[in-house]
Image (cartoon, rainbow, N blue to C red):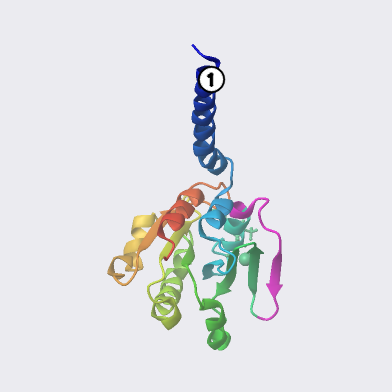
Amino acid sequence: MGEGCVIFKRLIYISVVGSLVLLSAPFLLISSMGLLSILRKLKSSPDRELRILLLGLDNAGKTTILKSLASEDISTITPTQGFNIKSVQTDGFKLNVWDIGGQRKIRPYWSNYFDNTDVLIYVIDSGDKSRFEETGNELQELLFEDKLVGVPILVYANKQDLINSAAASEIATGLNLHTIKDRVWQIQACSATSGEGVRDGMEWVIKNIRK
Ligand code: G3D
Ligand code: MG
């Protein structure tokens, strides 16, 4: 065998191994990233940020969910005065979080935050049956918002760890979620304190981000 042939074989070997390493790199990368990072990588481009609205009545568990999602990723949490809105911004990713209900007077100003929403996440305290009607009404109003037409919605049936909590299916029926026909929706049972179910919900979000 000539020396040229050996060098040629080596070159082929190096290029095959090199390609395999290059091909597997994205998968290795994804498995080592947090969910928010994956969201960011999937959606971010220099001129477009991913916008998620995280809404629900006060005490539903939004802040706890946010903390459980964010881990080390969140760089700033800025409470906006008067609105009770938190804006979480990382590069290519923006999460607007606020408590709805009891803030009807400022509702006209909300629309600033509705612009270009990619996904709406609505959090419900599954243990607080006395407020199911109130939270259902708020959700209905959101579904009628012009700027949120067609925006995918994930409902977290939170606090599933409480013994008196309603099942996600019960909440879906009570809130008439099955009548939603103008967008994709999902209800996800979760417990923000234990973290159970939170990740599953975000995986649905990733799959259903508005194109
Ligand atoms: P909000 O941001 O929607 O207003 P918070 O709600 O995240 O501040 O949570 C309100 C309270 O509910 C907090 O209790 C929080 O610990 C609790 N909570 C949030 N998620 C869960 C859950 O999944 N299970 C249980 N059992 N409690 C939860 P405190 O006592 O701090 O007010
Ligand atoms: Mg809060």
Local secondary structure at mark 1: helix
Residue that numbered label 1 is attached to: 4
Q: Amino acid at mark 1?
A: Gly
Ligand 2 location (quadrant)? bottom right
Q: Position of residue 9 (x, y in %)?
A: 50, 21
Which residue is at 68% across, 51% downward? 72
Whether residue 165 is visible here, answered yes or no, is: no
Which residue is at 49% across, 38% downward? 23
Q: Note whether 164 is above or below 77 in the view shown.
A: above
* In front of the other: 22 or 44: 22
Whether residue 206 is visible here, answered yes or no, is: yes
Which residue is at 36% across, 68% downward? 175
174 in magenta: no
Which residue is at 46% across, 68% downward? 130
* In front of the other: 105 or 28: 28
Q: Note whether 79 is above or below 29 in the view shown.
A: below
Q: Position of residue 34 (x, y in %)?
A: 58, 47
80 in magenta: yes
Q: Position of residue 169 (x, y in %)?
A: 34, 56
Name the quarter where the C terminus is drawn: bottom left
Q: Position of residue 42 (x, y in %)?
A: 51, 55
The region drawn magenta spans 68-82
Instruction: Please identify the quarter of the rendering in which residue 46 is found.
Output: bottom right
Dot 1 crowding, Cα within 10 Å, few <14, some 14–19, many 20+: few
Q: Note whether 179 is above or below 68 in the view shown.
A: below
Q: Residue farthest to the top?
A: 1
